[in-house]
């Protein structure tokens, strides 16, 4: 396949709930070159990361997506401004709890995920295989 795709960014309005329908539509536009399964997986994973940032880190600063054709993955990066709050790896969850499954989905869908921090920001990233 080709080379690494251009990184595209979606900026969020501050102080409001994330417009998840708009985010999913934007993702479909950006990922028109990959298959429907990859797009659906990316939409689900991105929705989880954006929701986590909104609920636990005062919202999302920016969302970026790129396609690395040389590695056959879609990379999603979600920035927030709470670097001291780091998502925890999935542990045994109470099956009756209504919360706590977002990162389990991220782990199940992605080929890799992690957290990078800097001064005043945190980026949670994940890579989804292109199918």
Image (cartoon, rainbow, N blue to C red):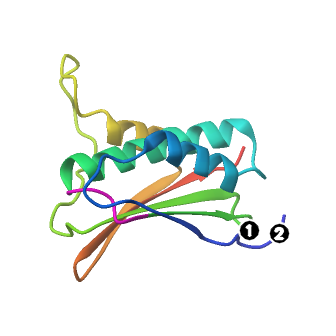
Residue 44 is marked as: none
Quadrant of the drawing holding the C terminus = top right
User: Residue 12's spot in the image, x, y percent?
Assistant: 40, 60
In the image, 68 versus 48, the foreground residue is 48
At a point 44% along the width and 42% down the height, the residue shown is 20
Q: Which residues are magenta?
A: 58-62
Residue 51 makes an appearance in the image: yes
Q: Cβ–Cβ below 8 Å for labels 2 and 1?
A: yes
Residue 87 magenta: no
**Circle 2: element type:** loop
Magenta segment's dominant SS is: loop
Q: Pinpoint residue 113: horizontal percent, then vertical percent.
A: 43, 56
Q: Which residue is mark 2?
A: 2
Spatial CA distance of label 2 from label 1 is: 6 Å
Q: In the visual, does 112 lie left or right of 61?
A: right
Left or right: where does residue 87 sit relative to residue 37?
left
Relative height, residue 76 to residue 93 (above, below): below
Q: Give me the residue at 42% from left, 45% from top.
A: 19
The residue wearing badge 1 is: 70
| Position in image of residue 33 (x %, y %) | 78, 52
Above or below 55: residue 72:
below
Mark 1, Cα crowd under 10 Å, few <14 / some 14-19 / many 20+, is: few
Looking at the rendered structure, the secondary structure element under dot 1 is: loop
Q: Nearer the viewer, mark 2 or mark 1?
A: 2
Residue ranking furthest to the bottom: 119
Residue 79 in the figure: left or right of residue 2: left
Residue found 75% across the figure and 42% down from its top: 35
Report if residue 107 is visible in the image.
Answer: no
Quarter that holds the N terminus:
bottom right
């Amino acid at each position: 396949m080709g080379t690494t795709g251009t990184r595209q960014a979606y900026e969020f309005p501050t102080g409001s709930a994330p417009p998840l329908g708009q985010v999913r539509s934007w993702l479909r536009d950006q990922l028109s070159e990959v298959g429907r399964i990859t797009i659906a997986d990316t939409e689900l994973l991105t929705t989880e990361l954006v929701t986590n940032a909104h609920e636990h880190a005062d919202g999302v600063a920016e969302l970026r997506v790129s396609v690395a054709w040389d590695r056959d993955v879609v990379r999603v990066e979600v920035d927030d401004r709470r670097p001291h709050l780091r998502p925890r790896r999935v542990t045994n969850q109470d099956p009756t709890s209504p919360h706590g499954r977002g990162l389990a989905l991220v782990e199940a869908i992605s080929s890799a995920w992690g957290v990078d921090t800097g001064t005043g920001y945190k980026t949670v990233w994940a890579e989804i295989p292109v199918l």
